[in-house]
Amino acid sequence: MTETVSANPMVGSLIFALGGLAGAVFAVPFRKIKGVAYESYWLFYALAGLLVFPLVLALITCPATFQTFGKVPASTLAQCAGFGALWGLGGLTWGLMIRYLGIGLGLAIGCGLCSATGTLIPPIVTGNAGALVATTGAKIVLAGVVGSLIGIGFVGLAGKFKEGELSEEQKKASVAEFNFKKGILVACFSGVASAGMNFGLQSGAALETAAKEAGTPVAWCGMPVLVVVLWGGLVVNAAWCLWQNRKNGTFGDYGKMFGGNFAAIALASLAGVIWACQFACQKVGEPQMGDLKYIGFAVVMGASIFFSSLLGIFMGEWKGTGAKTKGCLALGIVVLLVSFCVISYGSK
């Protein structure tokens, strides 16, 4: 016997927003890690966020997780993992983007691009582009997505103003390696490639069906999909970390961490768990959205932009900027908030 769930878009949107909050704050623990190279602690982030936490969550909520893998075509698993690997390439540079632009500006630009490509491309590629404007609600949702891009444009413009206003010392007081040009190039690549996450999450319908048939509650049927997608990302991330260790001679960092710097392991692992929560929330919220479940990625990313912009202000990343820069940033945040409301209304 399978469970059915009545769609409740407002509940779904709130769950997506919680995922966006997780996506906004996941990198905060990284700021407290000392004494080890970026690639060394990133490996623990990847192991915790891409392997351990998703698998444990899946096994708790869907005990038949491994059985579902054997009930779907191998091509489905390969497609999900392949898109996860594409996301992995973007995810590798996500941390670099934050290093160059800061949490507020970096996540805003990266998530904005990720939201647009991850939401609009899948329907177009699968020949379902008409679904984007099929109903009044769908048109309103699409308008909200476009609005989020306008909001991200204002936030990005504020970042450009910031670069011109502050001295190098002021820029690096809050973001030690601030570099707008490098950051924007990294953000463009990272944002587009990272949309592979949503491509993968939307490619696992057969896995969700198998999980449902095995008696998994509808809200958790997407967990096996998340596990497979993140496996693809894990392979890319782990390979890159080990390659960087070899290149930079930083294998000794692991000895330091296991030899006493347990804080680095704990903080990196915490960041990974928080990060994974955003897409766990997306898959849990999708059943509440009915036919508009495809907007989940846009709402999660939009909420990440909104919360990360506020976090950047709180952490002093915009301290010392002028009225024009702050006004542009404020306008971007307001537009993002309105866009989120528009998307929620359209889905309702």
Image: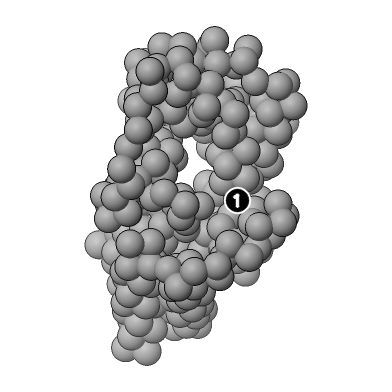
Q: Secondary structure at mark 1?
A: loop
Q: Is residue 186 left or right of residue 327?
A: right
Q: Which quarter of the figure has residue 155? A: bottom left
- Residue sitting at x 61%, y 21%: 251
Q: Identify the residue shown where x is 72% and y is 21%.
A: 74
**Is 339 situated above or below 323?**
above
- For the C terminus, give its image quadrant: bottom left
For residue 293, say whether it is visible: yes
Residue that carries the numbered disc 1 in the rendered image: 195
* Mark count: 1
Residue under the point 67% across and 25% down = 77
Q: Residue 246 at what x, y percent from top left? A: 70, 25
Q: How is the image coloured?
A: one colour
Q: Amino acid at mark 1?
A: Ala
State the residue in front, 74 or 81.
74
Q: Is residue 125 above or below residue 210?
A: below
Q: Quadrant of the N terminus?
A: top left
At which x and y percent is residue 343? 39, 66
Q: Residue 30 location, x and y as percent?
A: 40, 40
In the displayed structure, does residue 30 sit left or right of residue 150? Answer: left
The residue under the point 38% across, 30% down is 218
**In the foreground, 19 or 139:** 139
Does 114 sit left or right of 325 as displayed?
right
Horizontal side of 140 relative to 187 (left or right) equals left
Residue 346: image location, x then y, percent:
38, 67
Q: Is residue 70 above or below residue 233?
A: above
Tag 1: Cα neighbours inside 10 Å, few (<14), some, or many (≥20)? Answer: many
Could one spot residue 274 in this view of the protein? no
